[in-house]
Image (tube, grey):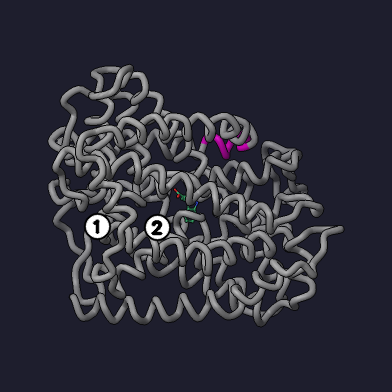
Amino acid sequence: MSHEHTSATPTEHQVRGQFTTKIGFALAAVGSAVGLGNIWKFPYIMGESGGAAFILVYLICIALVGIPVLLAEFVIGRHGQTSAVGSFRKIAPGKPWWLNGLLGIVAAFFILSFYSAVAGWVLRYAVLGVTHGYEGVGADQFLGFIDSIGGPVIFQFVVMFLTGAIIFAGIEKGVERVATWMMPVLVVLLLLVVLRALTLPGAGAGVAFMFKPDFSKIDGGVILVALGHAFFTLSIGMGAMITYASYVGKKQNLGTTALTVGAMDTGIAILAGLAIFPAVFAFGMEPDAGPGLLFIMLPELFAQMPLGRAVGIAFFTLVFIAALTSTISILEPVVTYLVDDLNIGRHVATAVSAGIIYVIGIPACLSAHSGGLLGEVKIPFLGGGLSIFDFLDTMSSKFMLPIGGLITCLFIAIAWNRKAASQEVVGEGGNPGHPLVSLWYYLTIVVAPLGVLAVLIYGIRELLNKG
Ligand code: TRP
């Protein structure tokens, strides 16, 4: 988005930028949604949670909860024209709804601290292609890298530095421009990798894994993973999309944008799965390898492709840029809050928040695998124990985001009126009486909140039983 000013003094913070082109906002939203959640997280949690049956539950969560909540956030942000905290406060003055915005700020710290670690691994793998290539790079190399003490923390620093620098300089718009051509190229590269994977002997078992559901794999814990991931992958439940939408012009139809974001995000996740699982089965490996899955499988594929080294370097570089358009969207709400609500200058706000997140991120980075320096440290959680890395991920994806989304739904149901919210969906001059707008409204005030509540209760009970 374009900030007319590069530095904000307390008195000029009211001067807010706006997306200048119609497509700018859609690109920023897609850039936020598409990232490591699609390429790294979706395949590995799908592999751990039983494949096709998980995908089905996930798609239901996206359709009935994810897209409605995404649109709710858009609507709140554009109406409020300020930070998430400020937007809740503006629409419902004197009521405590703004605390939901604050919960989102805390969630941003949790998410970015481990997300930046993984984005660092991606950068490492892009560099690895340049210096060494992908020949013979497998699980041992991956674990050797993430268990080492210096490397991952340095790459994570680069990630946080770049994220902060982009926001500091106010050039998010430049990044959006990059995203314009990045997305299509990323899709083409993904298709190339999918093609290679699908033509491996034995690839069919991987396709069956993704599309032949085995419902015995579904339990409360798996449903909670699917719901949490629907929030994570669409960047909802913490106010990121509220913040982005606060910079949109009044005429844009937000309903169309929400559907576009949902479709692109889901499509790219499925493609990432199709790149990885045929190879997993063709090479006789286990689908539940965990967070290392992407980094272990893809080099094997690149090593077996014509021009594989170049394809691999390009692929990891693009995934890294996709990760950056997401990290920006996690940090931006924090900065917007500090600037809009606490009158802190934009430069100071950016430097301080990025710095604190990096510091929290170091223990996250060193605990990503049991062999790491802090890998054996356990935080007690729901009767079990989690590593620092898993704790940050679990707390944010499975609890903070769904609870934030639930409160957002209740906000639409209770604190606002249907007429104003519906008009905001279609924008100035749009038709709020469209049946899809009514569908959105009922999904948001009835289906999504009840669904989230049921999954949370059912999931927590299951976790307690297992623990
Ligand atoms: N959706 C992004 C991804 O899939 C991650 C992300 C960006 C995010 N902004 C967010 C997750 C806000 C939760 C909340 O990689």
Q: At numbered mark 2, what does the secondary structure look like: helix, strand or loop?
A: helix
Q: Tell me the amino acid under the disc marked 2.
A: Phe
Left or right, 355 with respect to 24, comes to left
Is any atom of residue 11 visible in this view?
A: no
Residue 80 placement (x, y as % from top left): 72, 62
Q: Tally the numbered discs.
A: 2
The prevailing secondary structure element of the residues shown in magenta is helix
Residue span colored magenta: 165-172
Q: At numbered mark 1, what does the secondary structure look like: helix, strand or loop?
A: helix
Report the residue marked by disc 1: 48
How many other residues sit within 10 Å of disc 2, few (<14), some (14-19) or many (≥20)?
Answer: many
Left or right, 139 with respect to 85, comes to left
Give me the residue at 59% from left, 78% from top.
Answer: 410
- Reply yes or no: does residue 167 show up in magenta: yes
Give me the residue at 30% from left, 30% from top.
Answer: 125
- Reply yes or no: does residue 348 show up in magenta: no
Report the residue marked by disc 2: 110
Q: Mark 1 CB in 8 Å range of ligand 1?
A: no
* Disc number lying in front (2 or 1): 1
Gap in Å between the C-alphas at discs 2 and 1? 23 Å
Q: Nearer the viewer, residue 313 or 106?
A: 313
Whichever of callouts 2 and 1 sits on the residue coming sooner in the sequence is 1
Give me the residue at 31% from left, 68% from top.
Answer: 222
Residue reaching furthest to the right: 429
